[in-house]
Image (cartoon, grey):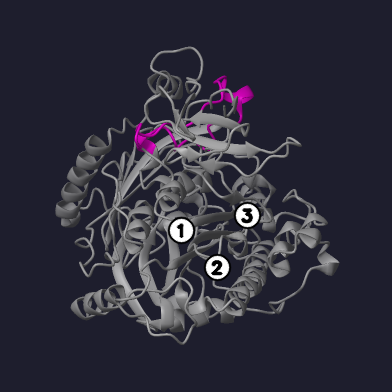
């Protein structure tokens, strides 16, 4: 099956994709070879949809993508929470390798006593969107960032609630990311309701309508005005680590109802793609930023917190209705996207290409393992690392004296979390539901995820499983050494390491500007800094920030604003120059 799949993938990649051809056009090798790329990203969602065997509710839009695309069945985030995961997606690097694994690096300073800081990747690291711009793509991010570092001003051609591929120049392919937050754990809070800002997906690129929406995600519809897509009498499969009570079933209903609403929002975006005659010229990726929103899912690195759906629809539904069982990590998304558009993969990226290049070469060898890490969540810290093959998960707890459960106040707004705490205090939880509240953790855990998908039976001390334990233990040691991760390093020491012993966050050197034969040349003395610029007209109106790549052709008297920014550093001061 794998050989056949590789042949199909290579066939697709050899055909090429036209950026502006009509949907019915053949995608021949003599045509433009840069496909549009569309990422549809939902939040806090495990694979609880029909293509993965969960038929609790219908999600017709997502199911149609699966019928026309490839369903990947072994895909894992690098963390059980969003910001570290998005750091991995944006850079192709493991978050724990560059200070991005503490959720979040800029918050809860009053609790931690630490300064706000940003993750600092390798000096030559750029965001995926920047690499795609360098390769000729228009990049649009609708809406969420949250990378554990501030994005450079020109990281996206447009980022925010109005960002859309429709604003691109006519001759450019696009890379567009649409984030759907209706499934976020806050959707389980009381009173429940849909985030009003998410209605923007129904408005396409209508700025006036979107501007009238509340922009903060906390603004929700009233329960009485919230669409009920899922019948109240729906039967839910409660995972064994949660109690089967009316409150928990109600949260399950909210979770699936939010998912059903998100399916409709995704349908609106896909319809816009079809309306623009771009559906069969675009590679569409649907996935979640990590596992589910419920307690013992989000923030943990059990599969309930890491495993996500991934469906890729290729143009003309090539490979439609197939599945792929290879292990895939979030660090693989960036290099795979670059390979898909024919761009080189930078050497600092930890991930690998799982699809293949457009020149006909096949994908990298299937990976044997995925890796994950857990550190700080808001004001509470831990140090856990995990490695998994297709069957076994190995977890190493660097603080065995500390229990698994962390009293994260945000999570405790969820009624199911409140129910768990109430039943814990009443001594009414069963054996599996109590596990999360143990006062200590084993130093090592080993789970057979095929026979024990909820990871409830630790096999680490079972002699029958000594060989997989030793093998995964060695793999974890290899991985930690390879990415230079020091688990349990005090966060203050991590900051010192990132800032190279300085007391304050390093700042990018101001850009240097020179002029030569009607062209503007810009540079920065900070290694790894990227430069952004924008033009000011006579009325001092500002154009969008653009990525500086080659000397700018400029007319005499033109005013230009310039800024330099290395990821993780403070950006430089803005320099304004007039072209002589």
Residue at the (49%, 58%) spot, across then down: 291
Q: Is residue 467 left or right of residue 178?
A: left
Q: In the rendered image, which residue does mark 1 sit on?
A: 304
Q: In the rendered image, which residue does mark 3 sit on?
A: 185
Task: Report crowding for label 1: few under 14, some 14 to 19, many 20 or more residues within 10 A (C-alpha).
Answer: many
What is the magenta range? 96-124
Nearer the camera: disc 2 or disc 3: 3
Where's the C terminus, which quadrant?
Answer: top right
In this rendering, the answer to whether 14 lies above or below 295 is below
In this rendering, the answer to whether 192 lies above or below 451 is above
Q: Is residue 521 left or right of residue 210?
A: left
Q: Foreground: 315 or 138?
A: 138
Which image quadrant for residue 485? top left
Q: Position of residue 369 (x, y in %)?
A: 25, 55
Q: Foreground: 338 or 363?
A: 338
Q: Position of residue 17 (x, y in %)?
A: 39, 74
């Amino acid at each position: 099956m794998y050989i056949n799949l590789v042949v199909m993938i290579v066939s697709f990649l050899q055909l090429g994709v036209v950026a502006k051809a009509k949907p019915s056009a053949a995608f021949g090798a003599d045509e433009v070879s840069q496909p549009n790329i569309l990422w549809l990203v939902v939040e806090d969602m495990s694979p609880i949809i029909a293509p993965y065997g969960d038929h609790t509710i219908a999600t017709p839009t997502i199911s149609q993508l699966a019928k026309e695309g490839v369903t990947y069945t072994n895909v894992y985030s690098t963390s059980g929470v969003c910001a570290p995961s998005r750091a991995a997606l944006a850079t192709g690097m493991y978050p724990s390798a560059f200070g991005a694994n503490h959720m979040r690096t800029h918050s809860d300073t009053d609790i931690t006593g630490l300064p706000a800081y940003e993750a600092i990747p390798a000096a030559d690291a750029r965001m995926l969107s920047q690499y795609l711009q360098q390769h000729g793509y228009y990049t649009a991010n609708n809406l969420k960032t949250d990378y554990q570092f501030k994005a450079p001003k020109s990281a996206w051609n447009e980022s925010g609630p109005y960002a859309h591929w429709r604003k691109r120049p006519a001759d450019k392919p696009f890379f567009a990311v649409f984030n759907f937050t209706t499934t976020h754990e806050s959707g389980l809070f009381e009173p429940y309701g849909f985030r009003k800002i998410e209605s923007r997906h129904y408005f396409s690129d209508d700025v006036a309508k979107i501007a009238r929406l509340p922009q903060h995600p906390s603004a929700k519809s009233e329960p009485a005005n919230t669409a009920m897509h899922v019948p109240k009498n729906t039967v839910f499969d409660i995972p064994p680590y949660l109690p089967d009570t009316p409150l928990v079933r109600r949260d399950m209903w909210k979770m699936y109802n939010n998912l059903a609403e998100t399916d409709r929002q995704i349908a609106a975006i896909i319809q816009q793609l079809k309306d623009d005659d771009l559906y069969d010229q675009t590679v569409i990726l649907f996935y979640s930023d990590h596992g589910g929103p419920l307690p013992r899912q989000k923030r943990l690195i059990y599969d309930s917190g890491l495993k996500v759906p991934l469906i890729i629809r290729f143009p003309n539904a090539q490979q439609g209705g197939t599945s792929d069982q290879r292990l895939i990590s979030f660090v693989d998304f960036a290099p795979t996207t670059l390979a898909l558009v024919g761009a080189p993969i930078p050497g600092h990226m930890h991930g690998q290409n799982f699809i293949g290049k457009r020149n006909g070469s096949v994908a990298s060898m299937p990976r044997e393992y995925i890796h994950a890490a857990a550190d700080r969540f808001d004001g509470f810290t831990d140090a856990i690392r995990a490695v998994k093959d297709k069957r076994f998960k190995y977890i190493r707890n660097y603080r065995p004296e500390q229990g698994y459960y962390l009293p994260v106040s945000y999570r405790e707004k969820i009624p199911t979390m409140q129910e768990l705490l109430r039943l814990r205090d009443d001594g009414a939880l069963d054996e599996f539901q109590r596990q999360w509240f143990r006062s200590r953790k084993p130093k090592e855990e080993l789970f057979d995820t095929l026979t024990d998908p909820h990871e409830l039976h630790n096999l680490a001390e079972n002699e029958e499983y000594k060989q997989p334990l030793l093998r995964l233990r060695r793999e974890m040691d290899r991985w930690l050494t390879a990415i230079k991760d020091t688990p349990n390093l005090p966060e203050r020491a991590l900051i010192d390491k990132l800032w190279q012993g300085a007391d304050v966050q390093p700042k990018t050197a101001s850009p240097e500007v020179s002029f030569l034969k009607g062209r503007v040349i810009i540079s920065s003395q900070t290694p790894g800094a990227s430069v952004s610029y924008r033009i000011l007209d006579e009325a001092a109106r500002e154009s969008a920030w653009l990525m500086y790549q080659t000397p700018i052709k400029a007319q005499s008297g033109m005013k230009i604003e310039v800024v330099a920014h290395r990821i993780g550093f403070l950006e430089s001061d803005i320099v304004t120059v007039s072209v002589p």
